[in-house]
Image (spheres, helix red, strand yellow):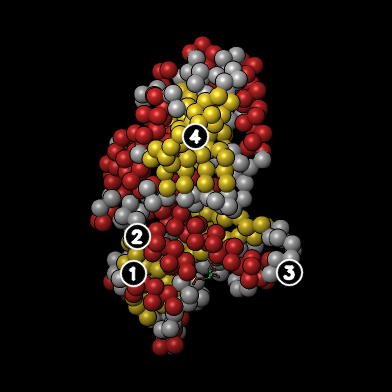
Amino acid sequence: MGSQQRLKLGVLISGRGSNLQALIDACADPAYPAEIVLVLSNKAGAQGLLRAKEAGIATAIVSHRDFATRESFDASVTAKLRDANVELVCLAGFMRVLTPSFVDAWRDRLINIHPSLLPAFPGVDTHARALQAGVRMHGCTVHYVRNDVDSGPIIVQAAVPVASGDSEDALAERVLAAEHRTYPLAVRWIAERRTRIIDERVVIDGVDGVAPSILSPDQALLPTVLADRHVRLVPMELSHADALADITVASGVAKLMTDPLSTRESVHRWVRAALNLRAGGTSLPFVVLDAATGAVVGTTRLGNWSAGDRRIEIGWTFYAPNAQGTSINPAAKRLLLEHAFETLGCVRVELKTDARNARSRAAIAKLGATEEGILRRHTRLADGTWRDTVYFGITDAEWPAVRARLDERLGLGSDRQRRAR
Ligand code: GAR
C-alpha cells in the first residue's frame, strides 16, 4: 500500500505511551493501512514523546497549564491536529477530559482505549475496582468517543480472566498486553474503512457475530464468522455433516486425509470430533460457503492452538471438485491467516500434509509458506498404515509478504486502494 492511502493518525498521550508504541510497531509494517503523523502530549515529560522521537514521528506539547479554559486548550489541540492533516485521533492514555466541542469536532474520528470492559469501570483505577468487585472477567475496550467519560460505540474488546489471588499489578500487566493487541486491530479496521456506526453500535465488514469483538487472545479460541467477497467461513455445526458427506463420499476428495471420509457415518463422526475439539477451545472448524451461491463447498480449520506459544495450524481442508482451482481456497487461507496473525496474535502458523500429496504440497508452497522438513512415520492413517508428514510454516515476520501475494492472487490490492480513496 502506498503511503498516500494510509490513514493519518494523531495520537494523544499523557505518559508512558506503551499503547502508542504498539501503534508505532504496527505502522512500521508498510502494509499496515495507517501511519502516525503527530504525537501530542499535554505533559512535556511524557515518556511516550521519546518513543515518538525515536521512531522519527513529529511531536507536539500542548500543556493544559498554559490555558485558562478547557475550551481554549482543546481548540489549540485541534489546531495542531488539523495542521498535521490528522484523519483519526487516537487517545492512548490521554488523561484529560475533552470538551463537548472537541468531541463534536472529531465525531466518529476520535477513538479511545480504556482498561476495562466498558461500560463497567469507566474512569480511573479500573483494575483495583475490578478486583474489589470480584469480577471474573476484566479486559479492555477500544471505542469511539462520545461526551460522557469513557463512553461511545464499542469497536473491539479483549476479555482477560481474573485469576484467584490476582494482584492489581499482575492483572494490569495482562490487560495491558491485551490492549497492545487490540488497539492496532481497531485502527486497522477503521483504516480499511470496514467500520460503520449504526444506531450507536459498530458494525465491522467481514466480522460477524460476537466473537472477535470479545477477543480473548490468551484463552480458548472463540467461534467466529470470517468472510470476504469470495467466501464465507462459518462455524461448523452437526447440521453441515450431510453437505460435507455429499462432497467426500462421491468424489473421494478426502482420500489422502488421515480419515478418507468415504462413508456418511465417518463424516458424521469426523464432524462430531471437530465440535468436541472446538468445545475444548483448541480448534475452530469451519465450513466454507461460496459467497456467491451460499452453497457448502468444503471445510477448513484452525487447530492445534497453542495459546502460550501463539502457534496454530491451518488444515483439515477439502473442497468439492468444482471449487478446486478457484479463488475459494486462497480466499479462505487469507482469512484464516489474517485471523491467526492479526486477531489471535500468532507468531507462527503451520500447515502440514501427507508427503505423497503433491497437489497439496504445491498449493501450500504457492502460498509462500516455507517447507520445513519431513517427519517420517509421523501419523497413523485410518487404514493402519503410517504416513510421512511434510511440515510448512509461516512466521509473523513473513505474513505481510504472504498476505501481499494472496492479495495479488485475489485481486484485493486494487480493491483496497479503491475503497481507501
Ligand atoms: C492504558 O492502560 C490505557 O488503557 C489507559 O491508560 C493507560 C495508558 O498506558 N487509559 C485510560 O485509562 C483512559 N480512560 P500507556 O501510556 O502505556 O499506553
Q: Secondary structure at mark 2?
A: loop
Which element carries disc 4, helix, strand or loop? strand
Q: How many marks?
A: 4
Q: Measure the C-alpha gap from mark 4 to mark 2.
A: 36 Å
Mark 2 lies on residue: 28
Determine whether the beta carbon of the residue marked 2 sits less than 8 angstroms from the nearest atom of ligand 1: no
Name which residue type carries label 2.
Answer: Ala
Would you say the residues marked 4 and 2 are in contact, meaning their CB atoms lie under 8 Å apart?
no
Percent across and percent down for residue 354 are: 47, 27
Image vertical order of residue 164 relative to residue 314, above or below? below
Q: Are marks 4 and 1 in contact (CB under 8 Å)?
A: no
Q: For residue 378, which numbered disc appears in the image?
A: none
Query: Which residue type carries mark 1?
Result: Ala
Dot 1 corresponds to which residue? 55
Residue 131, image x, y percentages: 71, 67
Residues at discs 1 and 3 in contact (Cβ within 8 Å): no
Q: Is mark 1 within 8 Å of ligand 1?
A: no
What is the x, y in percent for residue 85?
Answer: 29, 66
> Which callout, 1 or 3, points to the residue nearer the camera?
1
**Counting residues from the N terminus, which is met first, the one under dot 3 or under dot 4?**
3
Q: What residue sits right under mark 4 in the picture?
A: 375
Viewer-side label of 4, 1: 4
Dot 4 amino acid type: Leu
Left or right of 389? Residue 29 is left
Quick one: label 2, few (<14), some, or many (20+) residues within 10 Å? some
